[in-house]
Amino acid sequence: MQTTTRLHGVSLAEAFRVWARVALLSFGGPAGQIAVMHRIIVDEKRWVPESRFLHALNYCMLLPGPEAQQLATYIGWLMHRTVGGLVAGGLFILPGVISIMALSIIYALWGNVGIVGGLFFGLKAAVLAIVIEAVVRIGKRGLKSSAMRLLAAASFVGIFFFAAPFPLIILAAALIGYVEATRGNPAFAAVGHGATHEDGESLLGNETPSHALPSLRHTLHVGMIWLAAWLIPVAAILFVAGPDNVFSQIAVFFSKMAVVTFGGAYAVLAYVAQRAVDTYHWLTPAEMLNGLGMAETTPGPLIMVLQFVGFLAAFRSPGELPPFLAGVLGGILATWVTFAPCFLWIFLGAPYIEKIRANKALSGAMAAITAAVVGVILNLAIWFGIHTIFRRTVAVDDYGLSFDAPVLASMDFWSFALSIAAAIAIFRLRVGVLHTLAGSCLAGIGLFLVGAI
């Protein structure tokens, strides 16, 4: 009989090593992280089939919070039950927690990251190539018909040029997929339903593990445990410190953020930046951008910038605590109330998402969401590229359009050159992601030392 330590032929120790590797390579925001996960989990290790991966991704894109971390939790849960989800989801954020905390302390001490800035510069260029590869890889596998490609294009145009709300795009795609699948349109055959000719052999296959079967008892049990883990610390801080204390504000604000913010990392960060800068005055707009730069070029979800925000908020209002201790506690608190709900959404909802794989109409809706997600990832890739290669952008807000256009004269030559070199390394020379990142980092440090950047 299988146990938690070895399921589907994979021991928990091996899973730990693989998820640690995924975590250390999780650069580039959700697009790059999903690409790395896909390459290792689907193509290299063949733990889950293509259809299963995309089905899980569709669900995670519907949730508030970082979709890549939730996807890792989902797959870890499929492979090794709850402990596997904790290992995969926890390891996914651990490098980011350590990196952002260290950089927050450096920032608080000296106001800049010195030579680390050169490392970040090179790293960001390589990340752009990884993000572009993600669009190509996922697009090739998820867009199997003209209808799906049209949905992806419409999704990109809507979100990039017209700032259409992400939930509206996903809901529209789901409705189209549901209706067309009900009508028997073959273009909307569910990606996540049954095996496909793209799947090949995988350890999990398309079977539903016994622990993935939904039950009311399990739902109530999971809900009580994770709601308590998330909300009891918040209530305790409010009771002890009062609502005006900075730790209470951090706990309540980021808890609200974890529930109401949809649309991916950039939508979340826009909401957080507005409130943290204009309402709470925890940091300045420039500092918010510095934090985003840290999160973009360190492993882990982009949402890890919230730890930087929590650190500065508590560091500057430490009360009776030493400032650096207050900052560390504030950063950890922001991280906890941000990610505890992510585990709740997966452990609570994933069994029901697994169940609907057998429903052709609902799975057709999920397949349409896959196409829309490709458009969203393309939007992230272009957004990231614009802000990597160009120093300035101008807001376009005419004739219903709403997007940031690059100022061509502000192009950063060295950033452009490093991005092209990284793209050649990945696409043409087939250099591994880790080696490409390392080479770009060294190049960035070299440019910093000679004064080129």
Image (cartoon, rainbow, N blue to C red):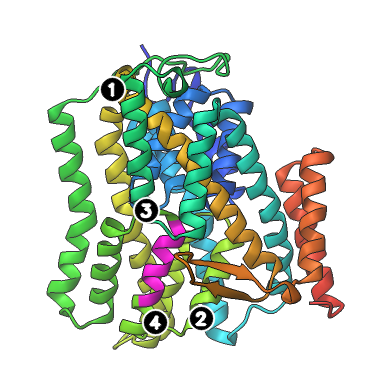
Q: Helix or strand or loop: what does disc 4 sit on?
A: helix
Q: Are marks 2 and 1 in contact (CB under 8 Å)?
A: no
Query: Which comes before the other along the chain, label 2 or label 1?
Result: 2
Q: What residue would you read off at disc 1? A: 355
Picture coordinates of residue 289 (x, y %)?
Answer: 53, 75
Residue 271 on the magenta span: yes
User: Which amino acid type corresponds to the residue marked 3 in the rendered image?
Assistant: Gly
User: Which amino acid type corresponds to the residue marked 2 in the rendered image?
Assistant: Glu
User: Which residue appears at 43% of the width and 47% of the height?
Assistant: 67
Q: Quadrant of the N terminus?
A: top left
Residue 414 can be seen in this image: yes
Magenta segment, which residues?
265-274
Q: Main secondary structure of the magenta part?
A: helix
Q: Quadrant of the C terminus?
A: bottom right
Q: What residue would you read off at disc 3? A: 65
Numbered badge on residue 287: 2
